[in-house]
Amino acid sequence: MTKRQKPTRRTAVWGTSLIVIAAVAVGIAAAANGPQSERASVEKKVVPVNFIAIEAVTQFDDVKTFSGTIEAARVSELGFARAGRLIKVYVDEGDHVYQGKILAQLNISHLEAQRLELQAQRAQAAALLAEFVAGPRQETIAAARADVDDVRSQFEHAQTTHQRNEDLHRRKVISKEEYDRSDFGVRSAKAKYDSAQRKLDELLAGTRKEIITAQRAAVSRLDAALKDLELDVDDANLTAPFDGRIAKRHVDEGTYVSPNTPAIRCVEFGKLEARIGLSVDIARTIQRGTQHDVLIGNKTYSATIKSVLPELDIATRTRTVVLALPAEASETVVPGEVARVSIPETVSTAGYWLPTTALSRGSRGLWSVLAITKDVESATEVAERRDVEVLHTQGERVLVRGTLQSGDHVITGGTHRIVAGQAVRGLMQ
């Protein structure tokens, strides 16, 4: 066996250099031929794809969902109509109350004292009126008749005496002074007799109508004062204006409250409303009294359109629609919850419907799709990129417009593995 010669240092260096040069040459050749070979492989590779033939539309039916809040039909901040010190609050927050129930009460001890005084005055005035209406008692009339008879006798006696003195005075038996005295006695007796007779006539005629009318007015004035006092007493009691629940208790016993100071917040029970803002165009189509489904949480209720408010909400640019919920909704729904209503509408917009899987992110905020076209040179089908603008999204499809025409074949899926110019074989979906 021949002994193998050991390579020298110069031989090893030269061999390594040859290997490096050969590798660089291969790399340069690959770099020069790479793009062409890649394009050639892409062109030769035909990818099967699903597509749809698109058709232009000028309008479409859509369902728009609007949201709002649940509110009680009536909410009242209750306060006293008069000032006073609060002595009793009969309810607490969360309590159910019925219409007319007394919720709180002010101190009315001074009003009770005024009532007793007015009642006494009224009783006195009523008794005097009854006396005027009944007229004088028979005993009083009899006494007046006796007085008339007595003064008439005195008058007749004075007349007789004066006649006798007149004769004596002519015969100069008595003096002029005695004659004048008897004449004065006659006139005095006549005046007393006339006065007594007038009193008797008044008693027989009864009380004058003017006096009775004035006394009746006095009684009525006291009745009005008592009624006004009763109103003050009623105002000292705070009552529930409707069936509801106590949402807030603002004051406690011992507080001095002023008129109309909020004391208790009461929310009506059993009558709830959904207040939802609709676009102006849709609000014009809403008819009062129609039924609409309202979604609250995960439950749907059939509500009735109660009214459409006439003013536009400046912040949301919507008109508020009020829907009355059925009574059973109050068992589970509470004010403040979110309510949603869906309303169908026809939208006039031109475009093309595509599945969302056909879209790819484009440039400048646009989207793009791949359409199948014929390559003139190779007479094969290839993918061509088209820029589109999304107009509306509806579930798993979108309405777009852009560089598309009716009848175009748009690839509906797998666009992430296809590039523009890719040879494809279309499969009608």
Image: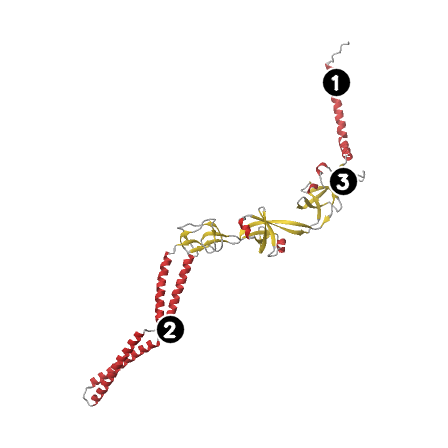
Looking at numbered disc 2 in the image, what kind of residue is underneath it?
Answer: Glu
Give the class, few, some or many, for how many residues have Cα within 10 Å of label 2's Cα (few <14, many ≥20): few
Numbered mark located on residue 332 in the image: none
Q: Which residue is mark 3?
A: 426
Mark found first going from the N terminus, 3 or 1 = 1
How far apart are the alpha carbons under marks 1 and 2? 152 Å
Vertical order, 3 against 34 (above or below): above
The residue that appears at 34% across and 69% down in the rendered structure is 128
Q: Is residue 148 left or right of residue 27?
A: left
Q: Is residue 255 left or right of residue 293?
A: left
Q: Is residue 142 left or right of residue 87?
A: left
Q: Which residue is mark 1?
A: 15
Mark found first going from the N terminus, 1 or 2 = 1
Mark found first going from the N terminus, 3 or 2 = 2
Looking at numbered disc 3 in the image, what kind of residue is underneath it?
Answer: Gly
Q: In the rendered image, is residue 259 in sight?
A: no
Looking at numbered disc 1 in the image, what kind of residue is underneath it?
Answer: Gly
Q: Which residue is mark 2?
A: 210
Location of residue 1 by image quarter: top right
